[in-house]
Amino acid sequence: MIKNYLLILKSLKVIGAGCACIGLLGSGIGIVFAALINSYAINPKLKNDLFNYALLGFALSEAVGLFALVMAVVILFS
């Protein structure tokens, strides 16, 4: 009986970790830099401001992906 409980608990942890990894889908950096190129093509005078905003967007999107990955590891190994 306890063996079945541990097996179910382990399988639920794996499913939960997989669900936590869904946040990794949003950490694509291609969209951020594609928007930078498009906006630079429209208004080249704002090059420095646009680049700073692109770096901020890149950092925030990667942070969300890393948080999701850390949560998956915490779920698996707790």
Image (cartoon, helix red, strand yellow):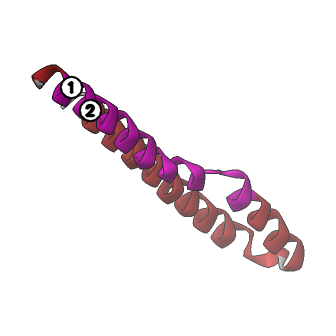
| Residue name at image x 89 percent, y 71 percent | 41
Task: Looking at the picture, tell me which residue is in the foreground, 43 or 24.
Answer: 24
- Residue 16, label in figure: none
Q: What residue is at 48 percent from the left and 53 percent from the top?
A: 23
Nearest-to-viewer mark from 2 and 1 = 1
Q: In whole angstroms, how far apart are the C-alphas of marks 2 and 1?
A: 6 Å
Range shown magenta = 4-33
Q: How crowded is mark 2: few (under 14 residues within 10 Å), some or many (20 or more)?
A: few
Q: Where is residue 78 in the image (x, y as percent from the top left)?
A: 18, 32
- Label 1 SS: helix
Labelled pair 2, 1 in contact (Cβ < 8 Å): yes
Residue projecting furthest to the top: 3
Residue for point 44% across, 54% down? 64
Q: Where is residue 21 in the image (x, y as percent from the top left)?
A: 46, 44
Q: In this view, does 20 lie to the left or right of 51?
A: left
Res. 58 image quadrant: bottom right
Q: Could you tell me which quadrant the N terminus lies in?
A: top left
- Which is more toward the observer, 43 or 69? 69
Q: Tell me where residue 27 appears, x and y as whole percent.
A: 57, 51
Residue 78 to residue 30: above or below: above
Local crowd size for mark 1, using a 10 Å CA cut-off: few (<14), some (14–19), many (≥20): few
Task: Say above or below: 40 vs 71.
Answer: below
In the picture of the structure, the residue carrying the numbered disc 2 is 8
Numbered disc total: 2
SS at circle 2: helix
| Residue 50 lies within the magenta run | no
Q: Nearer the viewer, residue 59 or 51?
A: 59
Give me the disc on residue 4. Answer: 1
Tag 2: amino acid: Ile
Residue 25 lies, with reference to residue 46, above or below; the image says above
Quarter where residue 77 is shown: top left
Residue 18 drawn above or below residue 39: above
